[in-house]
Image: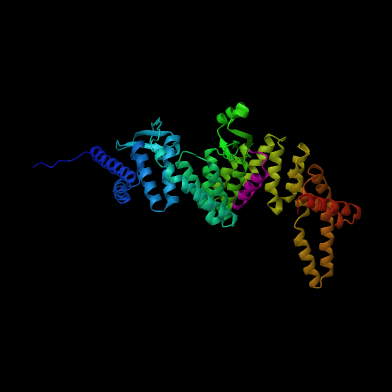
Amino acid sequence: MKKIFLSAALVSMTFAMAQKKEIAAAAKAVEAGDMSAANAQITAAEAAMGGQTYMLEPSVQEQYYYAKGMSLLKAGKSAEGATYLAKMTDLGKMKIYTGKDSSKNKVYYVGKEAADKSGIQGLKEETYNPTLTGKIANTINPLIESANKAAMDYYNAKNYAAAAPKFEEVYDLLKAGGQDNKQYLYYAGLNYALAQNRPAAIKVYDELISSGYTGAETTYTAKNKKSGALENLSKTAWDLYKKMGDAADYTDFKMDKSKNIEQELYETNAALLIEDGKYDAALALIDAGMKKFPKSTKLAEFQGTAYYKAGKMDDFVATLKSTVAKNPTDSNAWYNLGVLQSKDPATEAEAVASYKKSLELKPDYVEAWQNLTYLTMGDDAKAIDDYNAAKKAGKPDAANKIIEARRARLAATLPYAEKWYQYDPNNLEAVRLLKGLYQSNKNEAKFQEFKAKEAAMKAAEGK
């Protein structure tokens, strides 16, 4: 008998057909409540797939995520199950990139990022409409309420490490139901950061930034006359009921706009990346952030810190010097140059000059006045410690030199602090600093004036 050899393409097709049957059987078993059979079919399909879900057409991918997610939920693994179910929504919201790999296998990549990573050229864009989302509502709704309550309880108890994954679970469960509410993903990232889980926080912030999330959303609410409950409505429904007046089933119409936090996302993620030692990633993010938010003082400072810690300070200073040479009227560039120069004690004098140039171009540049104030003042706590150490060591001449140098620095600092306060009169930090400077310079009248200002501002803030 002759041996029969199957071509690679036919072998691949045979495996794909087997996977489709196993996944379809798993989905049917879930609907029948036979989780044992569902898990057996899923295990068999996964063994054949080897993690290559992109080899499955979108409808089969959806069946797989449905069966896998629901089986995990039924096993009490709601967070893990929610992650799989959320992928069903991605199938409908992202483009599907289809084509063939080098072995002529049909591939289906969900989203441009996955398609780009594949390296396959000439992929075509397609769309897919999920069909199974409606089948999970009854299962996930009570889980959403439970996870949200647990997340808030952990957060209020300042157990951020436990709150973060719960908020992420809420996000995934909502997404599985078709509601991609990234506010909960933001809460997860914030709690990961508070828990000092930097890798997890960075991953979440990366996702938020790449998705274009800004946090700026408009919500429409009204009170249901029958239940008395405040309900969220779509803009169309809200407008319609509002126009109906007394005939509507709703009253107390309110529209609220949330704050745009996009700049905060860039700043927080940059800080996390620097703290985690990922300087190149931080610099790439900061570069993108500063194009969007050129006046962000935090990004400018983080940029200097990242270059300094990465050992690239000279390169960046050179780049900024080139920028101000080409555009000497760019006050932000002069300011950023000052920030970087201030990081190195050897270039502090140059930093002062750069800040002053920035202020010539923009006299009300509050952050430049603030930085110039502190740069001129230097490390005052260290000066006091050095003075006390010299006195204790029985070195009166050295102690006198230290205190005289301190007086001179504080006297030189005063004019800059006054300018800072002039352009930022409601800043408690500026008021508090001026109070101390007037005391050091023995200006009793001004000291009392700013002591009273400080007390009034603290009282107004409830401190």
**How far across and how far down the image is residue 66, in percent?**
38, 43
Query: Which color scheme is applied?
Result: rainbow
First to last magenta residue range: 293-313
Residue at 70% over, 39% down: 332
Q: Residue furthest left?
A: 1
Between 73 and 47, the one lying in front of the other is: 73
Name the image quarter holding the N terminus: top left
Magenta span has 195? no
400 lies left or right of 10? right
Give the position of the C terminus as an image quadrant.
bottom right
Q: Is residue 385 left or right of residue 39?
A: right
Q: Position of residue 418 (x, y in %)?
A: 83, 47
Q: Give the quarter of the image for residue 176.
A: top left
Residue 195 appears left or right of 373: left
- Residue at the extreme right of the image, as rendered: 445
Quick check: can you spot residue 196? no
Q: Using the image, determine if residue 25 lies above or below residue 196.
A: above
Residue 128 or residue 257, whichever sits in front: 257
For the point 36% across and 36% down, which residue is it?
58
**276 or 316, nearer to the observer:** 276
Residue 310 in magenta stretch = yes
Q: Main secondary structure of the magenta part?
A: helix
Residue 44 position, x and y percent, is 28, 48
